[in-house]
Amino acid sequence: MTYKGYQAKVEMDEEAGLFHGEVLNTRDVITFQGRSVRELKKAFADSVDDYIEFCAARGEDPEKPFSGKFLVRVSPEMHRKIMAEARQQGKSLNTYVSEKLQRRASLT
């Protein structure tokens, strides 16, 4: 689930008949729960909005979700090899590396 850039993981507690979730991409703890998908989505949005309002009331900036950008330093030789392989496949370096990372992340 995603709301205002914040992503959440949801699990179901069969015994309690309840869904519960937690926002993933922040160090702050933001949780929510609901008995139906509709209730869960509303609780998620409400929790994120409450978090943003709480931070504003304290004069703090809420922790922002990850931007999707990060810098990786590699040797010039590795950079050359990766760029050559990307070009051979007709892809930009960014697309090539993103696809490799996505495939690797899917294996875990």
Image (cartoon, rainbow, N blue to C red):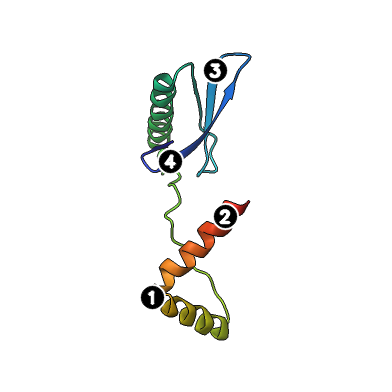
Q: Mark number for residue 90?
A: 1
Mark 1 or mark 2: name the one nearer the start of the chain. 1
Distance, label 2 to label 4, CA atoms, is 20 Å
Counting other residues with Cα less than 10 Å from the Cα at mark 4, is it few (<14), some (14-19), or many (20 or more)?
A: some
Location of mark 2 (residue): 105
Relative to 78, say whether 56 is above or below.
above
Secondary element under disc 4, as helix, strand or loop, is strand
Looking at the rendered structure, the kind of residue marked 3 is: Leu
- Name the residue at 53% across, 82% down: 81
Q: Earlier in the sequence, mark 2 or mark 3?
A: 3
Tag 2, which secondary structure? Answer: helix
Question: In the image, which is nearer the foreground, mark 1 or mark 2?
Answer: 1
Q: Is residue 24 shown above or below 93? A: above
Report the disc number at residue 18: 3
Question: What whole-number distance in Å separates the C-alpha atoms at marks 2 and 3?
Answer: 29 Å
Which residue is denoted by mark 4 in the rendering? Answer: 6
Mark 1 lies on a secondary structure that is loop
Q: CA distance from mark 4 to mark 3?
A: 21 Å
Residue at the far front: name it.
89
Amino acid carrying mark 4 in the image:
Tyr
Coordinates of residue 23 in the picture (x, y in percent): 50, 36
Q: Which callout, 2 or 3, points to the residue nearer the camera?
A: 2
Residue nearer the viewer, 23 or 95 = 95
Q: CA distance from mark 4 to mark 1?
A: 33 Å
Left or right: 46, with 79 as reference point: left
Mark toward the viewer: 3 or 1: 1
Residue furthest toward the top?
16
Q: Which circle's residue, 4 or 3, is located before the other in the chain?
A: 4
